[in-house]
Amino acid sequence: MRVSVIIPTHNEAQAIGRVLADLPSDLVTEVIVVDSNSTDGTPEIGATMGARVVHEPRRGYGRACLTGLAAAKSADVVVFLDGDYSDRPSELPILLAPITEGRADITLGSRLRDRSSAAALPWHQVLGNRFAASLIRALYGVNISDLGPFRAGRADVVRALELEQATYGWAVEMILKGVLAGYRVVEVPVSYYPRIGKSKIGGTFKGTVGAAWFILSLIVRYYFRRRTAPAPGSG
């Protein structure tokens, strides 16, 4: 099984070396660092440590993930991982197990199933993630507790979803489209630690409010779009 790990970065020089060093080399076929205009040497560190560096000048977390997905042409499974060392790359086997065992098409790493891991997140991020996850459970019937960035999916499935969100909504778009298309979305517990460096989203009030509003509106929009869509074969 060919596993491509996609790591979006923007000025993660303090952490990217530790992220790359902790990836299990026996499981990973290639590592793609998608860098957005870093000025601190992040892409150079990535290249030195054997990653394939793809430059994406346009900002946006979702856009970086989509650029990495397009670059992972030979992958059977794609993994998305932040470059700040808050998630532990050594836990990749936990994330991959449901897929390799044939129990899942997409796996999500939950930071909130373990109390000590949840404590590493700012309270407003815990509250927002729990609320968004509970809304998804209620509207879509999928049992998740978190919208964490550490996740994996069969490459053909992720491509079939035709993801479009370039910014905050990318992570939740994958879940919603996956569930609506009938794919198996499974959550597994992962550990979480304070990130190295300042968060580009959750570390600012504007970023937190903007992400929360965008994600919640997307959840509701997709739900009502499904309810108003014509049934197959009608008309």
Image (cartoon, rainbow, N blue to C red):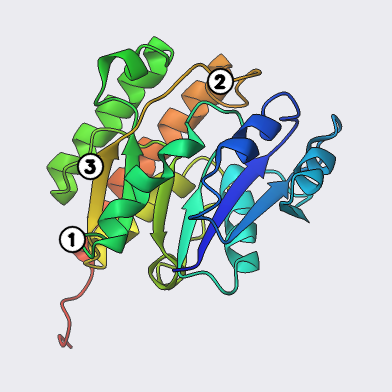
Residue picked out by circle 3: 136
- The circle on residue 195 is 2
Q: Position of residue 68 (x, y in %)?
A: 62, 58
* Occupied quadrant, residue 156: bottom left
Q: In the drawing, does residue 40 fall left or right of residue 97?
A: right
Quadrant (top left/top right/bottom left/bottom right) for the N terminus = bottom left
Q: In the drawing, does residue 204 fall left or right of residue 157?
A: right
Circle nearer the viewer, 2 or 1: 2
Circle nearer the viewer, 1 or 3: 3
Q: Dot 2: what SS?
A: loop
Q: Which comes before the other along the chain, label 1 or label 3?
A: 3
Q: Which comes before the other along the chain, label 2 or label 1?
A: 2
Q: Position of residue 31 (x, y in %)?
A: 63, 54
Total numbered badges shown on the rendered structure: 3
113 up-or-down from 233: above or below: above
Q: In the drawing, does residue 42 fall left or right of residue 126?
A: right
Residue picked out by circle 1: 227
Residue at the location (54% across, 15% down)?
A: 205
Q: Dot 1: what SS?
A: helix
Quadrant (top left/top right/bottom left/bottom right) for the C terminus = bottom left
